[in-house]
Image (cartoon, rainbow, N blue to C red):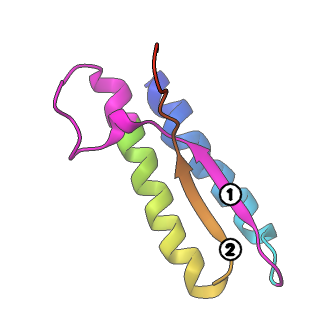
Amino acid sequence: MAQFSVNPVGPALVLKHFTPKMAREGRSIIAFQSARVGSIGDNRLGGWISYRKAKAALDQIVRTASIEIARSLSRDVVVAMYWQSRGGC
């Protein structure tokens, strides 16, 4: 439950409260921190079940919100991002 309250529920609340404030003119961008382990297609190692499902839920929330927001605010962007280290980590 801790993973869900932080990863998908927190960003869903941010979207709920900030989407109405997005620019009607110009462009607004809302970005969320995701992780590659949330990818269903890229899960070859297993493990981290609660974290994986929470990040997969976040990715689905962001994807759905981006589609819905594009209907009325076509210039605005909702995106989930993750970084991949190149080396030691």
Q: Position of residue 84 (x, y in %)?
A: 47, 33
Q: Are marks 1 and 2 in contact (CB under 8 Å)?
A: yes
- In this rendering, the answer to whether 6 lies above or below 70 is above
Is 56 on the left-hand or right-hand side of 20? left
Q: Is residue 33 magenta?
A: yes
Dividing the picture into quarters, in which one does residue 37 lie? top left
Question: What's the magenta region?
Answer: 25-54
Is 20 on the left-hand or right-hand side of 25? left
Q: Position of residue 60 (x, y in %)?
A: 39, 55
Badge number at residue 79? none
Whole-number angstrom distance, CA of label 1 to CA of label 2 = 8 Å
Identified at 73% across, 58% down, the residue is 17
Name the residue tied to disc 1: 30
Q: What element does badge 2 sit on?
A: loop
Badge number at residue 76? 2
Q: What element does badge 1 sit on?
A: strand
